[in-house]
Image (cartoon, rainbow, N blue to C red):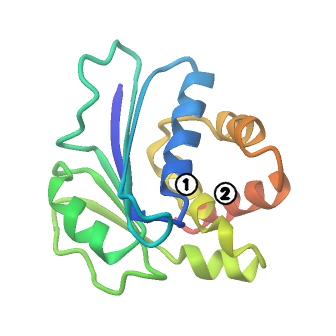
Amino acid sequence: MQEKVILGGFGGQGILLMGRLLAAAGVIDGKNVCWVPTYGPEKRGGTADCSVILSEAPIPSPLVTAPNSVIVMNEDAMGRFEPKLVPGGNLFVNSSFITAKSSRKDVNVYYVPCNEIAEKMKAPKSANLVMLGAYVKVSGSVSSKAIFSAVGEIMQKAQDINREAFEKGAAAV
């Protein structure tokens, strides 16, 4: 099994953190992992994306040109990464910020209102964990237990609210 995922959005949405948590969970689950972040010079508001590869076998290249899954948190990311998704792949769309529907008929699309879910929880910064919950439930690429361990190692605070956000994201798909 090899899962290649691209995550995209703008700075401040927790895109790189999502990728880092996914990569850390892969390590915890005993997988070979590659995480490549990309971002502009802006602190917030600029583009941010990363790619993560999770594999049972060694990973020969860190480049992700044809992902199995794409997670998009804003419209710009949708336009940039949706076309790269392989047929039969999974597209996860933050329907809180993206009103456009996917033009692809050959992929599975999951519209997740990440920001609305996070705001109802009174935890607006947890929208990324909501999306991560949806992605992990559908893809099965890592275990929920590994994600919770990664959250504990990397974030070290607000673990309860982040766990709740993850679970609500999983319930949304």
Disc 1 versus disc 2: distance between alpha carbons? 6 Å
The disc label shown at residue 141, or none = none
**What amino acid type should be assigned to the residue bearing mark 2?**
Phe
**What amino acid type should be assigned to the residue bearing mark 1?**
Leu
Residue tagged 1: 132
Horizontal side, residue 163 vs residue 9: left or right: right
- Label 1: few (<14), some (14–19) or many (≥20) C-alpha neighbours in 10 Å: many
Horizontal side, residue 14 vs residue 150: left or right: left
- The answer to whether marks 1 and 2 mark residues whose Cβ atoms lie closer than 8 Å is yes
Horizontal side, residue 172 vs residue 15: left or right: right
In percent of width and height, residue 77 lies at 30, 66
> What residue is rendered at 52% in x and 78% in y?
113
Residue tagged 2: 166
- Label 2: few (<14), some (14–19) or many (≥20) C-alpha neighbours in 10 Å: many
In percent of width and height, residue 66 lies at 18, 43
> What residue is rendered at 38% in x and 73% in y?
74
Can you say which quadrant of the picture contains the N terminus? Answer: top left
Label 1 secondary element: helix
Work out whether residue 56 or residue 98 is closer to the camera in this orientation and state it.
Answer: 98
> What residue is rendered at 74% in x and 46% in y?
155
